[in-house]
Image: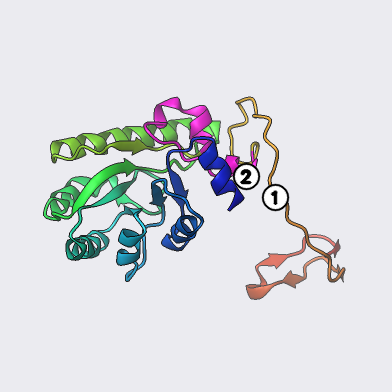
Amino acid sequence: MGQNQRLAAEGVDWFGVATPEEGIELRAAGNTKPILCLGGFWKGQESACLEQRLTPVVYRLDMIEAFDRAAKGAGVVADVHVKIDTGMGRLGIRSDEVSEFLEALKKFENIRVDGVMTHLAAADDPAHEVFTYKQLKNFQVAMKALREHGFSPTYVHAANSAATFSYPEARGDIVRPGGTLYGFTRDVLSPQIEAPSFLPVMALYSRIMLLKQVSKGESLGYGCTFQTNRDSLI
């Protein structure tokens, strides 16, 4: 929890976590800042999000329906951030389904769309610059659809670590540095930018249990997924 305290002292306005469990830990450690649950929540965690003042990222109507029901029962209007899948292919509403989703979203009276976000798949790779700009264009189209459906989110954000440094237009109102907070630079940033002088905050160590000589053509591991192409020391 040292990072929590240090970041708060440095003036961070929002904290991002993967799950409600992590958000609850931050609250228990005394964090009073807004906390965004980037992975959303599992069924049954709606009340915990409300009680702990956690803002979930939402990307399915059944999630929103459950959260709306819990918020109505608690007598509150709950904030959410809507995630748009502009090309990453993971969590998020597909770009071509945004209008239909927003039309359905209007009926939930205890939900307020406080933010909208997307995630860039290859902002660290100059070879995929065209694809990154395609994602940003898809995001702009989705934002236009939000406004046309009567939504006015306070926060708009698309910048992970790589985009924070390489695509200023993706920053919006919030940036979401992940790897760079751990001191990663070359692992997560474009090779075309000058690497910041960050220091890694952690390291992983292990010990070798066994060294084994294997011949060329031997299969290793479950499913025989690896086959040696030369005599090897494994």
Question: For numbered disc 1, what is the local secondary structure?
Answer: loop
- Colouring of the image: rainbow
Q: Is residue 164 magenta?
A: yes
Total marks placed: 2
Crowding near the residue tagged with mark 2, few <14, some 14–19, many ≥20 C-alpha atoms within 10 Å: some
Q: Residue at x 82, y 60 (%)?
A: 230
Q: Amino acid at mark 2?
A: Tyr
Counting from the top left corner in percent of width and height, residue 61 is at 23, 59
Q: Is residue 126 magenta?
A: no
Question: Which stretch appears magenta?
Answer: 161-184
* Amino acid type, residue under disc 1 in the picture: Met
Q: Name the spot of residue 181 as percent of width and height, x first.
A: 59, 42
Q: Earlier in the sequence, mark 1 or mark 2?
A: 2
The front one of 54 and 168 is 54
Q: Is residue 232 positioned above or below 56 on the image?
A: below
Name the residue furthest front. 30
Tell me how far mark 1 sits from mark 2, CA to CA. 7 Å
Neighbourhood count class around disc 1 (C-alpha, 10 Å): few under 14, some 14–19, many 20 upward:
few
Question: At x 77% / y 58%, what residue is drawn?
Answer: 205
Residue visible at 21% across and 63% down in the picture:
74
Residue 136 makes an appearance in the image: yes
Spot occupied by residue 56 in the image (x, y as percentages of width and height): 34, 54
**Residue 151 placement: quadrant:** top left
Q: Quadrant of the C terminus?
A: bottom right
Compared across the picture, whether 117 is left or right of 27 comes to left
Image coordinates of residue 128 in percent, x first then y, are 49, 35
Describe the element under mark 2 as helix, strand or loop.
Answer: helix
At a point 17% along the width and 52% down the height, the residue shown is 105
* Residue for badge 2: 182
The correct choice, above or below, for 192 with respect to 207 in the image is above
Marks 1 and 2: CB-CB under 8 Å? Answer: yes
Q: Which residue is mark 1?
A: 202
